[in-house]
Amino acid sequence: MSANLHPDPSSVRYSGPWTHRDVHANGIRFHIVEAAPRSDAPLVLLLHGFSDFWWSWRHQLTALAEIGYRAVAVDLRGYGDSDKPPRGYDGWTGAGDIAGLVRALGCTEATLVGHADGGLICWTTAVLHPRLVRSIAVVGSPHPAALKRAVLCDRRQRTAWLPNFLRYQLPRYGERLLTASDGREVVRLLHQRVSTDWAGGIEFRDTASRMRAAIQIPGAAHCALEYQRWAFRSQWRPDGRRFMATIREPIRIPVLSLHGELDTYVLRSTVHRGQQWSPHRRLVTVPGAAHFAHQENPDVVTTELAKFLA
């Protein structure tokens, strides 16, 4: 791809056994991908992680629909073919986006499923909009307070997680890094965080190709980084301290926490922290998978989700 040619946002609308739609919620337009046996089936919202987009959930989209759920994968604010407004990448607005989507889809509640940063939005929405969240399932996504504590107190977790997080704080540098050489940085991150076996396969190459194209959509890299920049800057501001104090409120709904046994980016010890914030949590280790367990071992993840939803 030429340095001056950027993908159109609609390029992420890959065809398949699903339907692409635009839904307006919380003041912006979201691109969603829906697979459903019927419109009144129980809603399951699927939220991707950093530098990713809805395609991350392709396996679960179809599998959950086949067993009777209304599965909806979302391009989060700023990603893929969703709107990319200049503001709204804070924790409060992220939760408001998901609450608005649940209502815009005509539902009174949903189960939220999230990977990595998408999982952080699941935790936040469960606290800030409890009446709309039936349960949450997270992949490689510890409770935000547990992650913060681990980064501060655990040298191994700090070494794995902090370097990229800090260098993405530099204005414009992160955007150039993510988009240079046709999104090579995104492929590097993916390769670093998945299992060796999966990294050597054809699905890895296909996924990497789609992710590196999606991050080059105008504005996508900047918006992706704004989530992380708010998380960093807000630590020293009243809104950030208020946010962390708020989400430490224990959530009483069922929580499924899935963690790849080979994940060296978010450590097992970090995921195991935080029982005080989610007393009804069940922890499951996904064999043969690392940080992208829902893609690396989709059968196990989908089976666990099905049991959890039932």
Image (spheres, rainbow, N blue to C red):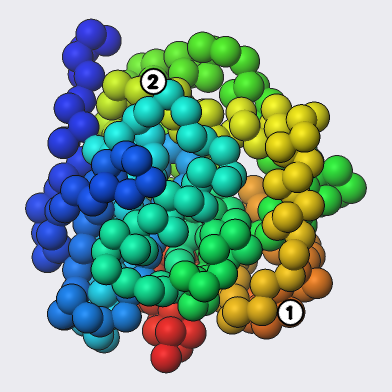
Give percent across and percent down for residue 282. Answer: 64, 81
Task: Identify the residue at image location x=27%, y=31%.
Answer: 213
Q: Nearer the viewer, residue 64 or 120?
A: 120
**Residue 36 vertical position relative to residue 166 in the rendered view, above or below:** below
Mark 2 belongs to which amino acid? Thr
Quarter occupied by the C terminus = bottom left
Instruction: Identify residue for label 1.
Output: 279
Task: Identify the residue at image location x=16%, y=80%.
Answer: 37
Give percent across and percent down for residue 110. Answer: 41, 72
Task: Identify the residue at image location x=59%, y=44%.
Answer: 91
**Residue 135 vertical position relative to residue 310 in the rendered view, above or below:** above
In this rendering, would 146 be left or right of 297?
A: right
State which quadrant residue 69 falls in. bottom left
Farthest residue, direction right: 153
> Can residue 184 be seen in the rendering of this structure?
no
Crowd band around label 1 with a 10 angstrom C-alpha radius: few (<14), some (14–19), many (20+): some
Secondary element under disc 1, as helix, strand or loop, is: loop
State which quadrant residue 11 falls in. top left
Mark 1 belongs to which amino acid? Pro
Task: Identify the residue at image location x=19%, y=14%.
Answer: 5
Secondary element under disc 2, as helix, strand or loop, is: helix
Disc nearer the start of the sequence (1/2): 2
In space, the residues marked 1 and 2 are separated at their CA atoms by: 41 Å
Instruction: Identify residue for label 2.
Output: 179
Quarter occupied by the N terminus = top left
- Give the mark toward the camera: 1 or 2: 1
> Can residue 40 be seen in the rendering of this structure?
yes
**Residue 108 vertical position relative to residue 156 in the rendered view, above or below:** below
Give percent across and percent down for residue 122. Answer: 53, 60
